[in-house]
Image: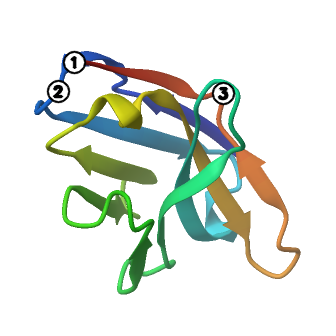
Amino acid sequence: VQLVESGGGLVQAGGSLRLSCAASGSTFSIDAMGWYRQAPGKQRELVAGITSGGGTTNYADSVKGRFTISRDNAKNTMYLQMNSLKPEDTAVYYCNAVATGSWTRYWGQGTQVTVSS
C-alpha cells in the first residue's frame, strides 16, 4: 500500500485547508485510516481516525468541531477538512492506513501545514 498526501500549504489563522490522501497498491486490504501530525520538537499525535466504511470517526480534543475526516473508498482517497485553523495546528500531517488481518501500518510521506498568526 502506498499513501500520498496533498493539500498542505500556508494559510492565515482562521482559514481552511483540505488535505487528501490517495492510496494505491493493495487497497483492498485497507481497514481503518487516520491523520496524524507532528510539530517541531513534539511527538506524532493522532488527529482523526475513521473506520473502513466511514461510519465511525474520532478526533483529538484539540480539533473537535473544526476538522472533519472522511473517505471515498471508490476513489481510494481519504480527506481532512480543516477549518478555523490556528497557529498551533502547524505541523507535518501524515496519512496512516491499517491493513486488515495483519494490522500492518502504512504511512505517507507527510504534507506541511503552516498557519500564520
Q: Quadrant of residue 27?
A: bottom right
**Label 1, on which residue?**
117
Gap between marks 1 and 2, in whole Å? 5 Å
Q: Residue at 83%, 82% (x, y): give it.
A: 101
Q: In the drawing, does residue 13 fall left or right of residue 10?
A: left
Q: Residue at 65%, 36% (x, y): give it.
A: 108
Q: Residue at 38%, 36% (x, y): give it.
A: 89
The correct choice, above or below, for 100 with respect to 11 in the image is: below
> In terms of secondary structure, where does tag 3 sit?
loop
Q: Position of residue 10 (x, y in %)?
A: 29, 13
- Tag 2 or tag 3, which sits nearer the N-term? 2
- Tag 2 or tag 1, which sits nearer the N-term? 2
Q: Position of residue 104 (x, y in %)?
A: 85, 64
> In terms of secondary structure, where does tag 2 sit?
loop
Q: Nearer the viewer, residue 27 or 16?
A: 16
Gap between marks 1 and 3, in whole Å? 26 Å
**Label 2, on which residue?**
13
Q: Position of residue 105 (x, y in %)?
A: 79, 58
